[in-house]
Image (cartoon, grey):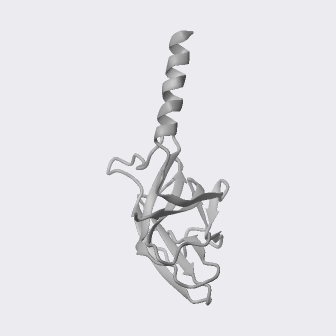
Amino acid sequence: MKIKNSILFILLLLMVISCDKRSIFDQYKSVGNAWHKDSIVTFELPKLDPKKSFNMYVNVRDNDNYPFNNLFLIVSLEQPNHQIKVDTLEYQMTNPDGTLLGNGFSDIKENKLFYKNKVNFTQKGIYKIHIKQANRQTGKIDGVSLLLGISDVGFRIESTE
């Protein structure tokens, strides 16, 4: 019994020590069992210091049902003046042998995917992030209607200091 308590104490201590001091915003939203091509995941960002710069990431939780090697996303940054900056992004999601990249001990993996580096939020008002999947099968024009294997989509902002 003492060994179990000691192990539990060590695990809790490691969790407390490893708290992330750079994280400013980190939120996930579920997309269910499959991510529909018309489903847009939106995050309203907190007010951020205009004098500081931030790194931004898209977070994805996926599992063994994910059928592709790569993930294509359309990420839009909506500024308070309603100007929208759109990026089409591609991320590698598997190793060459087909095993999923990412962190996790089970069949669910978490991926922290780089989006933008050293961004300043100088306008007053609300910024929003919109994320949409844009996967296509080889040789097909239409996008994949239901993307299996993605359960949650997140967005993360970290301080550069």
Between 107 and 68, which is closer to the camera in this rendering?
A: 107
Q: Determine the residue positioned at 64% across, 82% down.
A: 125
The percent position of residue 47, horizontal first and vertical second, equals: 61, 72
Looking at the rendered image, the quarter that the N terminus falls into is top right
The residue most toward the left is 96
Looking at the rendered image, the quarter that the C terminus falls into is bottom left
Q: Determine the residue positioned at 52% across, 38% down.
A: 16
- Taking 6 as reference, is 31 above or below it? below
The percent position of residue 156, horizontal first and vertical second, equals: 52, 62
Q: Is residue 136 visible?
A: no
Q: Is residue 127 visible?
A: yes
The percent position of residue 12, horizontal first and vertical second, equals: 53, 31
The percent position of residue 52, horizontal first and vertical second, equals: 46, 73
Q: Determine the residue positioned at 47% across, 34% down.
A: 14
- Residue 68 found in image quarter: bottom left
Q: How many marks?
A: 0
- Taking 51 as reference, is 26 above or below it? above
Between 86 and 10, which is closer to the camera in this rendering?
A: 10
On screen, residue 120 versus residue 153, left or right, reads: left
The residue most toward the top is 1
Between 143 and 155, which is closer to the camera in this rendering?
A: 155
On screen, residue 142 versus residue 114, left or right, reads: right
- Taking 104 as reference, is 57 above or below it? below
Between 144 and 150, which is closer to the camera in this rendering?
A: 150
